[in-house]
Amino acid sequence: MKQLLELIGFLALVQGVMGLLHEFADWHIGFVQRIGFLDGYEVYASVALIVLAFALFAAAGSRRSG
């Protein structure tokens, strides 16, 4: 379970960072900008993904191995 939380946290962190790079550096990468209902809220969604990633890392850190 710990490894699953870490994997999901890593994916959320990568997608959040790529969403911010898309908005501020005009790189055409990431998944957040492709979701229609988030149109205009991509920066907020990317920041939320980064916060979620750190919460998942904290949850994974508090669990025992196994």
Image (cartoon, rainbow, N blue to C red):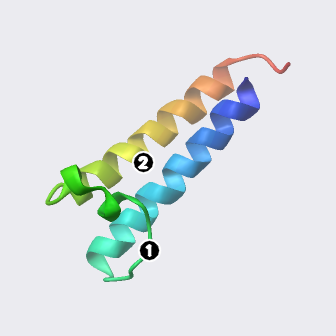
Which quarter of the image is occupied by the N terminus? top right
State the image coordinates of residue 48 (x, y, percent, origin top left): 33, 44
Report the side of 60 relative to 13 (left or right): right
- Cα separation, mark 2 vs mark 1, equals 16 Å
Q: Residue at x 44, y 74 (%)?
A: 29
Report the side of 5 relative to 44 (left or right): right
Residue type, label 2: Ile
Report the side of 10 relative to 32 (left or right): right
- What residue did someone put label 2 on? 50
Residues tagged 2 and 1 counted as in contact (Cβ below 8 A):
no
SS class, disc 1: loop
Q: What is the number of the mark on residue 60?
A: none
State the image coordinates of residue 2 (x, y, percent, origin top left): 73, 26
Residue type, label 1: Ile
Q: Residue at x 23, y 56 (%)?
A: 36
Write down the quadrant of residue 26 in the picture: bottom left
Q: Is residue 64 above or below residue 2?
A: above
- What residue did someone put label 1 on? 29
State the image coordinates of residue 35 (x, y, percent, origin top left): 30, 56
Mark 2 vs 1, N-terminal side: 1
State the image coordinates of residue 65 (x, y, percent, origin top left): 83, 21
Between marks 2 and 1 in the image, the one whose residue lies nearer the viewer: 1
- How many marks can you see? 2
